[in-house]
Amino acid sequence: MKVAILSGSVYGTAEEVARHAEGVLKKAGLDAWHNPRASLEDVLAFGPESFLVVTSTTGMGELPDNLQPLYYAIRDRLPAWHGQPGGVIALGDSSYGDTYCAGGEQVRELFAELGVLEVLPMLRVDASESVTPEQDAEPWLAEFVNALRS
Ligand SMILES: Cc1cc2nc3c(=O)[nH]c(=O)nc-3n(C[C@H](O)[C@H](O)[C@H](O)COP(=O)(O)O)c2cc1C
C-alpha cells in the first residue's frame, strides 16, 4: 500500500515525527513516501492509496506556512481520493486552549471534504507533556499500520 506522508512544521518537530513515521511504515512493509516540500503534482505523481498528515499548529490555530500551499492546492483541486484511508498526527500545545491542535483539525476537515476516511482518531501530541514526540507516536503508528492492512 502506497502511503503519502505530508508534513507541516515551523521548528522541525512535526517534520521529525513525519520522518520517523516514514521509517516505521517502511519497516512494516508499506510503500511510504515523505517529501516535506511536496507540491500537489509531486503527491499525484506518487499515486497515493492512503495518507498520513503530520502537522503542528502555529499563530492562533493556523497551519504552518510550509503546509499551506499544498493544503490549499488540494482544497482547490479536490483530487479523486474519495474512500481512501488516512490519519492525522497533530502536534500542538494544550496551553493554547481553544486552538489546541487546530492545524490538525483543519486537515481533518479537508479529509472530510475529500472523502478520505480517518481510520483512527487523530493523535494529539502535546508539547507541554511530551519531550519525545517521535517515540510517543509509535503506539498510534502501530495501530495505523494495522488499520491500513485490514
Ligand atoms: C508562535 C507559536 C504559536 C503556536 N500556536 C499554537 C496554537 O495555536 N495551538 C497549538 O496547539 N499549538 C500552538 N503552538 C505550539 C506548537 O504547535 C508546538 O510547539 C509544536 O510541537 C511545534 O512543532 P513544530 O516544531 O513542528 O513547528 C504554537 C507555537 C508557537 C511558537
Image (tube, grey):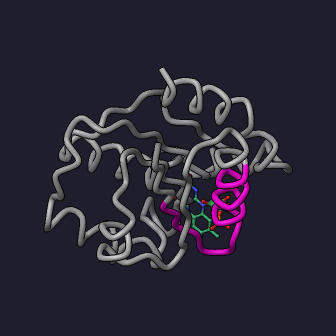
The spot of residue 40 in percent (x, y) is 31, 73
Q: Residue furthest right?
A: 131
Residue at image coords 14%, 67%: 76
Residue at 69% over, 56% down: 17
Q: Quadrant of residue 143?
A: top right
Q: Is residue 108 left or right of residue 35?
A: left
The magenta stretch spans residue 8: yes
- Rendered-image quarter of ligand 1: bottom right
The location of residue 83, given as percent across then percent down, is: 23, 35
Which residue corresponds to the image point at 44% horizontal and 55% vertical from the top-left? 103
> Against 101, is 76 above or below?
below
Relative to 122, does residue 120 appear above or below in the rendering? above
149 on left or right of 27:
left
Counting every numbered tag in the picture gives 0
**Considering only vertical position in the picture, is 8 above or below 2?**
below
Which quadrant would residue 123 be assigned to in this image? top right
Main SS, magenta residues:
helix
Q: Position of residue 72 (x, y in %)?
A: 25, 70
For the point 48% across and 28% down, which residue is it?
121
Magenta segment boundaries in residue numbering: 6-23
Q: Position of residue 149 (x, y in %)?
A: 51, 27
Q: Residue furthest top?
A: 150
Which one is nearer the viewer's eye here, 137 or 58?
137
Is 36 inside the magenta-drawn segment? no
